[in-house]
Image: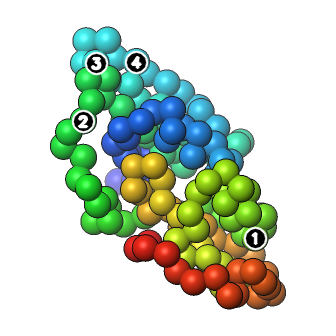
């Protein structure tokens, strides 16, 4: 029986902040389900043009709060996205107040954290870019 990837679900505490973060990464809202009876919302976000439901991040938001979110979501692992220009993407994130936990020292890979402490890996599409400042000199910050 064939298997196919559908989505990755992450619980979020601040829906607006989380949606804004994933939009900064370049994702778009593909679908939203507000479940009145269960008092939760599911927001499916995906890269542009990938609206077939096979590259989604499902943001799960409990309307009455979610006290059971762990303080450190590192056990989750990470989400990974390729980007056209890792330096431009990281600069845009920094310009919008996002900490680059592992800068793209090598022109290939960076890590950031979502507002809900989800680790997000950014990978340069194709070949690595030539290492360049300020990225080669920036140190790592926190865990990634």
**Residue designated by label 2:** 66
Nearer the observer, disc 1 or disc 3? 1
Looking at the image, which residue is at 24% across and 35% down? 66
Side of 15 relative to 128 (left or right): left
Side of 78 relative to 28 (left or right): left
Quadrant of the rendered image containing residue 97: bottom right
- Tell me how far mark 3 sits from mark 2, CA to CA: 11 Å
**Residue designated by label 1:** 87
**Residue that lies at the very extreme toward the top in this rendered image:** 36
| Sequence-wise first label, 2 or 4 | 4
| Sequence-wise first label, 2 or 1 | 2
- Visible residue check, residue 22: yes
Provide residue 39's location: percent of width, then percent of height. 28, 18
**Residue designated by label 3:** 39
Q: Residues within 10 Å of mark 3 (few under 14, many from 20)?
A: few
- Tell me how far mark 4 sits from mark 1, CA to CA: 36 Å
Residue 29, above or below 68: above
């Amino acid at each position: 029986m064939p298997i196919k990837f559908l989505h990755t679900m992450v619980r979020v505490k601040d829906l607006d902040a989380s949606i804004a973060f994933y939009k900064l990464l370049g994702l778009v809202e593909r679908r939203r389900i507000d479940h009145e009876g269960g008092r939760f919302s599911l927001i499916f976000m995906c890269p542009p043009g990938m609206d077939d439901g096979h590259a989604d991040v499902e943001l799960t938001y409990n309307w009455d709060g979610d006290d059971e979110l762990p303080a450190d979501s590192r056990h989750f692992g990470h989400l990974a996205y390729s980007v056209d220009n890792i330096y431009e993407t990281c600069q845009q994130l920094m310009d919008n107040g996002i900490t680059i936990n592992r800068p793209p020292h090598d022109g290939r890979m960076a890590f950031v954290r979502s507002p809900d402490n989800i680790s997000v890996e950014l990978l340069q599409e194709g070949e690595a870019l030539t290492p360049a400042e300020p990225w080669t000199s920036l140190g790592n910050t926190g865990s990634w």
